[in-house]
Image (spheres, grey):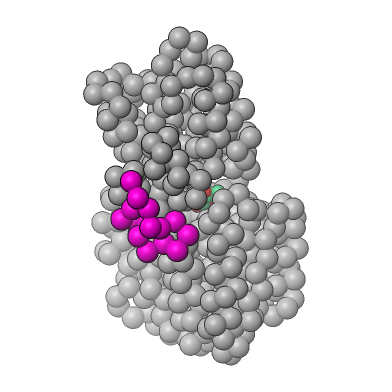
Amino acid sequence: MSKFMRSFAAVAAISALTLTGCGREEEPPAVEGSGEAVSSGFDEGAAIGVALPQKTSENWVLAEQLFNEDLTEAGYEPDVQFANGGVSEQQNQINSMITNGVKVLVVGAIDGGQLGTQLQQAEDAGITVIAYDRLLTDTENVDYYVAYDNFQVGELQGQALLDGMKEAKAEGPYNIELFAGSPDDANAQVFFDGAMSVLQPEIDSGNVVIVSGQDTFDQAVTQGWKAENAQKRMDTLLAGNYGSTELDGVLSPNDTLARAILTSVEGAGKALPVVTGQDSEVESVKSIMEGKQYSTINKDTRALVDHTIEMVNNLQSGEELEINDPDSYDNGVKTVPAYLLDPQIVTEDNAAEAYADDPTLGPLTK
Ligand code: BGC
């Protein structure tokens, strides 16, 4: 998470191990180092449940495919479900995974605070719960969190916005607007906070101006991560604040919303601002190479799924799980031991290199 919190991670690791086990009685004592104590394992061919949210970005669609293929290859019986119908559909899917006897539940929640009943049932059935990409909140019954470092994603977006505006225009003040993700997704606030940690000093000094004055998370949110909601809000912001005023930059939390924002600005006939993104979506990487969208964030889904399956393997064999951030993710009830991967900022300058080995995006030419 933040550099400040990271520096605590190593020191806190050992004490956190004793506090954050999965709550099973047969836990062996934690071993000094990066590990997490686990219980005695389960059968090799066990069923593994993977509950995914709505298809709000390409990363989730790829995750479905990879979990199905790679869990099968590893000898498990995957039960991978999307909940396009919303929260109650996801609740039902998790119920049926529990009934079907899964040993591990991997959950990418639509709303991480709405699964308390199901996760209690999972705990009662002795199932280990891994929050995948999005934190599960307000529950004791989540054992681990695996994700890209969300705060760092926000920091990289905030810095990219500043860098991009400086490249386009050497001197400020710069006029910007802020967009955040869906408030039911715990990541949205963390992305926003990370970005604001970089932007706030520039706002305070007057070098960056939020022309609409809409500077809080609540004002910036985009319900359901829906492109049409971001586009509508951008239309309104432009109509109300940018008659003859230039717009230099927009903080966008992901690629889907970045493209919606650019569509709105184009529709209003204004010069394109610097717009950030996240997820390395095909259309956004194209847009970056064409010099339209400024940046995205590379969070390789394959690496995240690989690490999750490694965690499942450790649980299966009763080995320790590696935790590299034991104390950043307080879910309101407990601190969830996390394994975080590093995100990478991508602009036109490093896209070819960043996606050189990506079967969907590479090779790219400038
Ligand atoms: C993910 C992002 C994604 C967003 C919308 C977030 O929880 O971390 O990568 O853009 O959901 O799907």
Farthest residue in the top direction? 244
Identify whether 231 is placed above or below 347: above
Q: Residue at x 30, y 78 (%)?
A: 32
Left or right: residue 135 compared with residue 123: left
Residue at the (31%, 38%) spot, across then down:
159
The reply, left or right, for residue 58 in relation to residue 116 is: left
Quick check: can you spot residue 195? no
**Magenta-tinted stretch:** 352-366
The percent coordinates of residue 141 (x first, y second) are 58, 66
At 75% across and 71% down in the image, what residue appears? 96
Residue 168 appears in which quarter of the rendering? top left
Q: Is residue 56 left or right of residue 22?
A: right
Q: Is residue 172 left or right of residue 126?
A: left
Residue 185: x and y in percent read: 57, 48
Q: Nearer the viewer, residue 38 or 177?
A: 177
Q: Main secondary structure of the magenta part?
A: loop
Please provide percent x and percent y for residue 112. Answer: 60, 54
* Above or below, comparing residue 258 to residue 366 in the picture: above
The location of residue 173, given as percent across then percent down, is 30, 18
- Looking at this view, is 126 or 199 the one in front? 199
Q: Is residue 69 magenta?
A: no
Q: Is residue 295 above or below residue 80?
A: above
Residue 181 in sight here: yes
